[in-house]
Structure formats: C-alpha cells, structure tokens
Amino acid sequence: MAVSLDTDVANQIDSGAIKVIALIKFELTGNGETPDKTVGYHNGGRDFTWSGQDYLPNRFLDADGLMAGLGNQISERKILFSGVPTDNADDAIASIENYDYINAPVTVTYLCGDPETEEVLGVLVTHFYEINGVEFETGATDENGQATISLTISLETLSRRYRDQTHVKRSVEDQNRHNSATDTAFEYVATSPDWPMEWGQR
C-alpha cells in the first residue's frame, strides 16, 4: 500500500538533507495496584511533545536498537535500554515488571526534520508493534546503594491495532478482550487435535 508524504517532508527528502527523529511509545496495562500508563521516549536532550503525547529524553535508550530501516518489511525489532536507574518512580521502563507488558502496544514513529533549523516537518513512517518478551539484566549497586537494570524488549509486528481489524485471534484471552468477554470459541483449540475421530457406519 502506497502512502504519500506531506509536501514539506517530500521536499526536504528531495533536498538530500533530513534529520530523523525517532519516537517510541509504550501503552502498558497495570498489574494489581499499578495503574495503566502510556509513556514515550526519545533520544533528544529535552522533553518533546508530538500528537498530544509527551516523550521523555532518555539517555539509556540505545539508539542502535531504536533506529532501523524505514521500509515496511520489518518483522521484528529489539529495543535496548542500558543502565536504567531503578529509583525513578515515574519511569515505567525501570519498573516494567509491575505491568502486564506481554502484547502491550508499542508505536515507533520516525519524524522528518530540517537539520539546519531542527524544525519538525512531519511523519516519515510509523510502525505498530506489541511486546513479545522482555529480558532483564540487573547491574551492580553503586556506593549509594543505587541499582540499575538493562532491558532488551522484543517486539513483533502483529500489533493489537492490526488484530482489531480482523476476526483472527490467537487465544481465549484475545477473543474475550477484542470480541466478547464471554466468548468460548477458542476454549478447546489446544485439545481438539487429540479428540478421537470415528468414520463409517457404527
């Protein structure tokens, strides 16, 4: 499917000089007493707001993990956060284990900017993912008792946004969440292949 770019973005690309601004947004579901939280990050040096979402500057976000090709054929991606302090209560990534993060929607947006003026001109491309898994690595504790954590967040492209547009669901939980809270269509999916089949006359 072809997607046309804004005129300002297309003109800047044609000029041969662009600044790519990468944004990542996590929509996390609370677990127990932890409320739901939507949090955004980018690699810039100050707070940034785009399309009503505040994106926090995060020096712990690995730029190599966030930046990638702009094509539509990206099947999976790993987002890296290195050496994140665990004492910031407002940092959802530092406490991601307090959320039901599996299948949480993740939006990665690349903006086009003018490298000379740093003006944001528009969107280059947006990819929708969901969290497939998180690997944790706890760092050493410093002299002040401050611990850090490093995370590798695996994303897959079967985002909740795409699944909402089809009748294909992956589990009872998906079916209940997206279609009907009492639907039991997938209840016997795991066991049905083992059911004995009888053919012919009895």
Image (tube, helix red, strand yellow):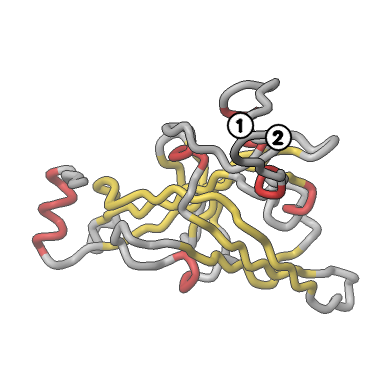
Residue 5 in the image: above or below residue 117: above
Q: Which residue is mark 1?
A: 175
**What whole-number distance in Å separates the C-alpha atoms at marks 2 and 1?**
10 Å
Q: Decide: few, some or many residues near mark 2? Use Cα within 10 Å; few <14, some 14-19, many ≥20.
A: few
Closer to the chain start, of discs 2 and 1, is: 1
Residue 176 in the image: above or below residue 80: above
Compared across the picture, whether 49 is left or right of 202 comes to: left
Compared across the picture, whether 22 is left or right of 40 comes to: left
Q: Which is closer to the viewer, label 2 or label 1?
A: 2
Residue at (10% x, 62% y) in the render: 15
Q: Residue 20, image x and y in percent?
A: 32, 61
Q: Decide: few, some or many residues near mark 1? Use Cα within 10 Å; few <14, some 14-19, many ≥20.
A: some
Residue at (57% x, 47% y) in the render: 26
Q: Residue 189, image x and y in percent?
A: 66, 41
Residue at (61% x, 47% y) in the render: 103
Compared across the picture, whether 73 is left or right of 96 comes to: left
Between 155 and 40, the one nearer to me in the picture: 155
> On residue 118, which mark appears?
none
Q: Residue 198, image x and y in percent?
A: 66, 41
Q: Quadrant of residue 16?
A: bottom left
Residue 103 in the image: above or below residue 200: below
Residue at (48% x, 70% y) in the render: 63
Three-letter amino acid code at the position of disc 1: Gln
Most distant residue in the front direction = 201
Three-letter amino acid code at the position of disc 2: Glu
Q: Secondary structure at mark 2?
A: loop
> On residue 187, which mark appears?
2
